[in-house]
Amino acid sequence: AQRVTQPEKLLSVFKGAPVELKCNYSYSGSPELFWYVQYSRQRLQLLLRHISRESIKGFTADLNKGETSFHLKKPFAQEEDSAMYYCALNGGATNKLIFGTGTLLAVQP
Amino acid sequence: GAGVSQSPSNKVTEKGKDVELRCDPISGHTALYWYRQRLGQGLEFLIYFQGNSAPDKSGLPSDRFSAERTGESVSTLTIQRTQQEDSAVYLCASSFGVGLTGELFFGEGSRLTVL
């Protein structure tokens, strides 16, 4: 079964500290993985996708097939990064994303 | 419109009543998705439309739930004989074409409260 696990409901860090939001997935094939973000009072929106290998707002995420992980990282957190982050998996021919339960990132001043 | 539009934004209903939730996708987006988000939980896939067809209804939790799409545009999610466990935020999203690029454009959601 396809599944996405985000073990932390809440991650609280101080401004300037490194951030790592954990995501593990369960899928036997070659997955496509994404991070979505929801800022306060805004819509859920795409942050980044693993196939693009891009850095968005200083965030990066590397797909580790051996560990079946796709952790989201940023070296220096900013207050404006505070938001709800969702990891999502597209596991094959089905055109749907499977989402994790989300992690609330709180960056303290 | 500029984005995905959902209505109503909030709906309070009594147990046993039927509700209809509406989604207007971004113009030109052929794929449309419904997700449900219960308090403290992730997004739960309900149904997906490609054009007016629904190739994947696997997430609909019971036969009380149904959805349709017309004119490759507006979609309506109907919940019959609502139960308290149906209380959630119902999110609609749309995207371009067949094949998933990963970028779903979400609406603001319809918050349903069943008393």
Image: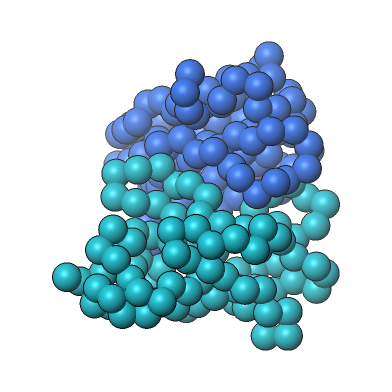
Chain colours: A cyan, B blue
Q: Residue A104 vs residue B70: left or right?
A: left
Q: Residue B52 vs residue B95: left or right?
A: right
Determine the residue positioned at 55% across, 30% down.
B77
Above or below for A79 versus A17: above
Above or below for A78 versus B61: below
The answer to whether residue B15 shows anywhere in this view is no
Q: Quadrant of residue A11?
A: bottom left
Residue lying farthest left? A109
Give coordinates of residue A33: x percent, y percent. Answer: 65, 63
The answer to whether residue A83 shows anywhere in this view is yes
In depth, the one of A49 and B18 nearer the eye is: A49
Determine the residue positioned at 24% across, 73% down.
A15
Q: Quadrant of the C terminus of chain B?
A: top left
Q: Count of labels shown? A: 0
Determine the residue positioned at 45% across, 51% down.
B37
In depth, the one of A62 and B95 nearer the eye is: A62
Above or below for B68 versus B87: above
Give coordinates of residue A17: x percent, y percent. Answer: 31, 80
Give coordinates of residue A108: x percent, y percent. Answer: 20, 71
Above or below for A20 versus A84: below
Give coordinates of residue B106: x percent, y percent. Answer: 50, 39
Q: Quadrant of residue B74?
A: top right
Residue lying farthest top? B71
In depth, the one of B82 and A34 nearer the eye is: A34
